Amino acid sequence: MTVLTDTWRWLTDPAHWSGENGVWHRLAEHLQLTVVCLALSCLIALPIALLLGHLGRGGALAVNLANVGRAVPTFAVLVLLLLSPIGGAGAWPTIVALVLFAIPPLLTNAYVGMRGVDRDVVRAARGMGMTGRQLLLAVEIPLALPLVLAGVRIAAVQLVATATLAALAGGGGLGRIITAGFNLASTPQVVAGAVLVAVFALLVEGLFELGGRLGRRRPWEPA
């Protein structure tokens, strides 16, 4: 109970929320890193998955290769990048490691969503004279969108949790609160940092869930 009480005192102390090392500043850094990594991951994974899902060729190999990446710890990738000649302290090693970590769920969900589109609908669209581009944009992607967005949600939540590793490479984010707590031998600060990361991840999960419900709601349905 002492640790929980001291953690609550740390979290409710206004001095820990302001300034360059305060919670709000670290939260903004964490959010920025998450958004950048998620955007880069989507730009890499989604076009490949959507195209392969549309063509129906090569997708299984791409998904299997992406799933192999899940078996490689992000921390190990980060360490290798930091030790490489092109690495070093800073944001880029962390961004590269996190992008590689976020690609598998994006690639897998988008490809599975595309291949899960009803083939009868696809054949009917082709019979109506739709070109491949029209079929992709007007039929397949809209029908696959729920699974695509589920992959984005999974990747976003995983990035929020894993972006704490940025502190190990000299970056910012909520991980700096945890590492500072270890350096100060302050268990309440370590626990407080972990709680902040967990709450942030839950908030991101909740926002995606709310956005998904609003997106599925018809205009005439009550909120």
Image (cartoon, rainbow, N blue to C red):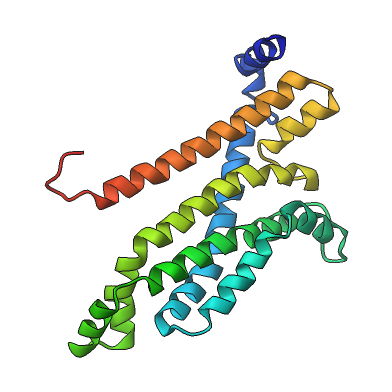
Depth check: give the residue in front, 121 or 154: 121
| Figure quadrant of the N terminus | top right
**Image location (x, y in percent) of residue 13:** 63, 14
The answer to whether residue 200 shows anywhere in this view is yes
Residue 26, above or below 48: above
The answer to which of 177 and 8 lies nearer the viewer is 8
Can you say whether 52 is above or below 26 in the image? below
Q: Is residue 129 visible?
A: no
Q: Residue at x 72, y 46 (%)?
A: 166
- The vertical placement of 190 against 119, above or below, is above
Image quadrant in which you'd find residue 133: bottom left
Q: Residue at x 48, y 41 (%)?
A: 204
Q: Residue at x 20, y 89 (%)?
A: 127
Q: Position of residue 72 (x, y in %)?
A: 73, 60
Q: Is residue 20 left or right of residue 36?
A: right
The image position of residue 156, as x and y in percent, is: 53, 50
Residue visible at 59% across and 56% down? 37
Along the viewing direction, whichever of 87 and 63 lies nearer the viewer: 63
Quarter holding the C terminus? top left
Tell me if residue 189 comes above or below residue 197 in the rendering: above
**Horizontal side, residue 81 vs residue 8: left or right:** right
- How far from the left and from the top, in percent, is residue 96? 69, 61
Q: Quadrant of residue 191?
A: top right
